[in-house]
Image (tube, rainbow, N blue to C red):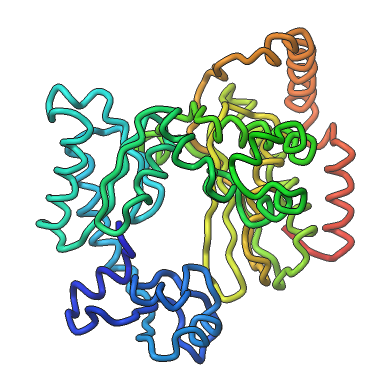
Amino acid sequence: MDAFYAAVEIRDNPELTGKPLIIGALPHERGVVSTCSYEARKFGVRSAMSIKEAYRLCPGGVYMHPNMSKYKEASDRIHEIWLTYTDLVEFISLDEGFMNVTGSPIHFGGAGKIGYAIKERTKAETGLTCSVGIGYSMMSAKLASEEKKPDGFFEIMSAKALKSLIIDRGVRVIYGVGPKTANELNGVGINTVRELLKNKQTVISRLGNHGKELIALAEGIDDRKVTPHYEAESKSVSREQTFQKDITDFGYLKDALRLLVKELSLRIRAEGIYARTVTLKVKYANMKLITRSKSGAAIWRAKEIYEIASSLLDKVEERPVRLIGVGLSGLTETDFKQMTIDDIENQQTERRREALDDTLLSLQRRYGDEVIKTGNEMMAERRLYSAGEEE
């Protein structure tokens, strides 16, 4: 959807048309921008910007608190439209989602016709505009949806087309590159996708496996699958911790994450299942709640889950936090993934690791979860408990 919250308010109050509208906190309050109209964006206002900075840039704007019940009502109607074309829909938020329509052309005439039909129905039935992107993968569809905003339509139908489109753009265009990762790459002279692909070894040495993922995405390789909404809703587990006082030390938050992840890992391992999506949940001192997710290969090990959750935490704004949580979804009984050369070469090591994992699980089932701890887990416990926090 295009500037969703702002668009709903403008639809319901036409007098706001053409004005720089900022949804979030009011100028005299603490808070951030939830979203803003395209007129406000011309002043440099952006989502997640502090409201004081937004007011400095756009003192003549119209500032409003969000009306979540109204936006949820509009979102429900939009979701109904999507679901008439396929049930393979992964809802990312109230106003955004991925649709797998590979099985729908026989009924609706192909992805292009479906995309235009959604745009027309959305406008007619809700009074709102949306931008549709069609691609051969999740990243290509996401990029395509942003290419012609607002009220846009764009297609990226091959890895070659995607690479050609983004090759001279900044590295932030790649899925998974946030401000911190971009700054780290910029610090070694890698500013564009072209420079990233020319310096693969540097990227890998700086970012490890995450660097390998970014290189693959820059090459147009993206094997992620759409997780249908009914699987995400019915197959998920989560743990969270509320702090007695607001936490500003993000190292402390990572210690809390490590222990939450351990519990989740034991739970899904005991059930013989794997997770394809890790979601971080953060509630700030001002009660603003955010979530960040990353999907990929099926995993269950605490170390792998923690690395993803920790990297997601690195990308959020560092402000006082009152609650942190982590969730696992896209649960599956198989860890099938496309094998790489590295995977094949490391099969023997992996089998030994799995045998050790099975032994550890057997001990934990027999003697309790606390019978075995990693050094990192023991250090995290000491740091948490020495600070006097209770779970």
Which residue is painted at 61% across and 53% down in the image? 178
Residue 296 screen position, x and y as percent: 55, 32
Q: Nearer the viewer, residue 60 or 356?
A: 60
Can the viewer see residue 180?
A: yes
Marker count (numbered)? 0
Examine the rendered structure and indicate whether residue 354 appears above or below residue 77: above
Residue 248 screen position, x and y as percent: 74, 69
Which part of the image, by quadrant, shows the N terminus? bottom left
Can the viewer see residue 302?
A: no
Residue farthest toward the left in the current orientation of the protein: 124
Q: Quadrant of residue 197?
A: top right
Q: Would residue 104 appear left or right of 89 to someone viewing this image? A: left
Residue 166 screen position, x and y as percent: 49, 42
Residue 126 screen position, x and y as percent: 15, 60
Which residue is painted at 73% across and 16% down in the image? 354
Q: Nearer the viewer, residue 310 or 268?
A: 310
Q: Quadrant of residue 281?
A: bottom right
Q: Would residue 72 appear left or right of 256 to someone viewing this image? A: left
Q: Nearer the viewer, residue 99 or 369?
A: 99
Q: Would residue 177 appear left or right of 155 to someone viewing this image? A: right
Which residue is painted at 18% across and 45% down in the image? 118
Examine the rendered structure and indicate whether residue 185 appears above or below residue 245: above
Q: Would residue 339 appear left or right of 374 to someone viewing this image? A: left
Which part of the image, by quadrant, shows the C terminus? bottom right
Examine the rendered structure and indicate whether residue 12 appears above or below residue 172: below
Which residue is painted at 24% across and 82% down in the image? 16
